[in-house]
Image (spheres, grey):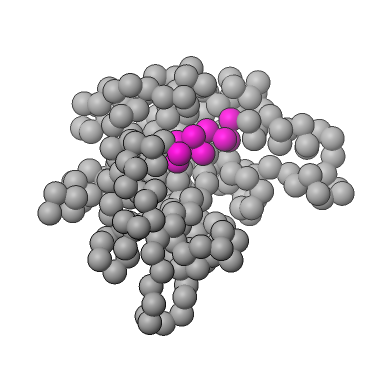
Amino acid sequence: MAIRHVYHTFCVPLLQNLMHHAEKFAGWARAIEAKTDGASACVFGFLDGHFNTCCQIVGHGPDVLYSGYYREHGLKYQHLTAPDGLCIHLAPPFVGSKHDATMLDESGLLDELRDVIAHLGKHYCMYADAIYSLSIYCLTGYRRSNPNTTAAQREWTRIMNAPRTSVEWIIGKVGTTCALTTDERQQKLMLQNLGMIYSVATLVTNCHTCCYGGVTSQYFETVPPELEAYMA
């Protein structure tokens, strides 16, 4: 099957192996630092979860695909994106009821990031919204609803949240580039390997960005890699 071949040949090494991109961390961090006026010098990418609707499964145990937040059935994907417009890590899918912070803990991404930091000998971290837990590997914004949040912390959050929305642009581009992933009628979990299909769609979107650029690379004033270099 062509999708299975593409998944194992390209998606696994390019989307599930953070070490593959380690040498680019410094350049990504500089691009983010420049866009945030020096608000953070160690952030190399942005993290977010994405809920993708699918058909309901009937008669197969607990309804774990149902998300009370979205009030739909679906799978959730964890995207880590870079300022050149590429998704650099996509964990295998989780059930729709899974919380974003739990996905991060169970995805193995933190372990991969620790290995990259040890390899580079320099600390880097991701940035995500406040739904995630703050750690040395994942910075998050301060909640405005918290009465203890200072004016300086609110301003820092405002500065960092502006470029953080780039992860949503990249996730949205997957849906527009590969419309199959957004057609709920075609998302049949018992008949298709939806995680594999979504991973290939993300890879195709990355390839499109390598060839034609995108909003994210324009925003950060970065240049995506050449397609040959990315796929090598």
Q: Name the image quarter holding the N terminus.
A: bottom left
Residues in magenta, as a range: 163-172
Residue 47: x, y in percent?
A: 52, 44
Q: Is residue 133 visible?
A: yes
Horizontal side, residue 177 vs residue 158: left or right: left
Q: Is residue 192 above or below residue 134?
A: below
Residue 156, quarter of picture: top right
Q: Is residue 43 magenta?
A: no
Residue 99, quarter of picture: bottom right
* Residue at 66% from the left image edge and 48% from the top image edge: 130
Horizontal side, residue 75 vs residue 195: left or right: right
Residue 49: x, y in percent?
A: 51, 51
Compare residues 57 and 214 and report the one nearer the observer: 57
Judged by its main secondary structure, the magenta piece is: helix
* Residue at 41% from the left image edge and 24% from the top image edge: 214
* Residue at 26% from the left image edge and 62% from the top image edge: 192
Residue 66: x, y in percent?
A: 50, 68
* Residue at 47% from the left image edge and 19% from the top image edge: 218
Residue 5: x, y in percent?
A: 15, 50
Compare residues 64 and 115 and report the one nearer the observer: 64
Considering every residue shown, the one lying at the far right of the view is: 147
Q: Is residue 200 above or below residue 44?
A: below
Q: Is residue 48 above or below residue 187?
A: above
Q: Name the image quarter holding the C terminus.
A: top left
Total tally of numbered discs in the picture: 0
Considering every residue shown, the one lying at the far left of the view is: 1
Q: Is residue 20 visible?
A: no
Horizontal side, residue 173 vs residue 9: left or right: right
Q: Is residue 170 magenta?
A: yes
